Amino acid sequence: MRKIFATTLLCTVLAASPGAAAQLEAPGGVGGCVFLGISREMRLATMAAYARGGPSAIGEVQNLRREIQEPARRCSDGGDINRDDALLAAFLSTVMKSTNALKLSRHGLAQARLDAVWAQAAQADKALFVAHAQSFFAGQPAPEFSDQGAAALVDALALSPSTRAEAHRDGIHYFQAVAMNEMAEARLASKAGQ
């Protein structure tokens, strides 16, 4: 039932707002290369898996490693997504960013606006999101997100009261993905420079 809902959600967003997908920024970096290196059907399947369960669905998306192995190897000069946490995180965070950007587009928030809020935010306002990303690489439980800890970034989105609850959650997930993506791509760049 949740699979049908998640797929329906993505299709509904795309149908209700045909320009929604066009508003998505083309994903960059190694994670974006891997994401764009899989078939459109596989991209939609990974986004639907994530939309179905949010961060708890990451395990399901990770089960697709076999299908993404070749694009991952090609995009990272031979990297193994089964052994490289940064490579896996770059891909997963790209899925998370794209899915949440698409979901937020229903509320009139373009991905360019989301990225501008992140870029202009003070480091202190990003701290909880960065700590969440660091926990992934450290193999530790992720810190709990409180409204207070995420307030500055989500408040900067200027959400309407009628969409605040749903968009607030999606905004938090988007910024979690941005923090993880930045950290993963930095780790991959550091490896490539060695």
Image: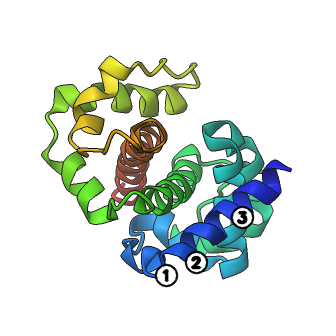
Identified at 56% across, 20% down, the residue is: 140
Residue 110 % position (x, y): 32, 64
Distance of mark 1 from mark 2, alpha carbons?
5 Å
Q: Tag 2: residue type?
A: Ala
Its colouring scheme is rainbow
Residue 128 % position (x, y): 34, 25
Q: Check the picture and name the quadrant holding the C terminus.
A: bottom left
Disc 1, SS: loop
Identified at 59% across, 51% down, the residue is: 88
Label 3 with label 2: CB-CB less than 8 Å: no
Residue 139 lies in what quarter of the image?
top right
Q: Which mark is residue 8?
A: 3
Label 1 with label 2: CB-CB less than 8 Å: yes
Label 3 with label 1: CB-CB less than 8 Å: no
Identified at 44% across, 74% down, the residue is: 20
Seen from the viewer's position, the closer of residues 22 and 96 is 22
Seen from the viewer's position, the closer of residues 156 and 95 is 156
Q: Vertically, is 106 above or below 75?
A: above
Q: Which mark is residue 18?
A: 1
Q: Is residue 39 visible?
A: no
Residue 81 % position (x, y): 65, 56
Q: Vertically, is 36 above or below 3?
A: below
Mark 3 vs 2, N-terminal side: 3
Disc 3, SS: helix
How would you rate the neighbour count of disc 3 (Cα within 10 Å): few for under 14, some for 14-19, many for 20 or more? few
Seen from the viewer's position, the closer of residues 85 and 7 is 7
Q: Which mark is residue 15?
A: 2
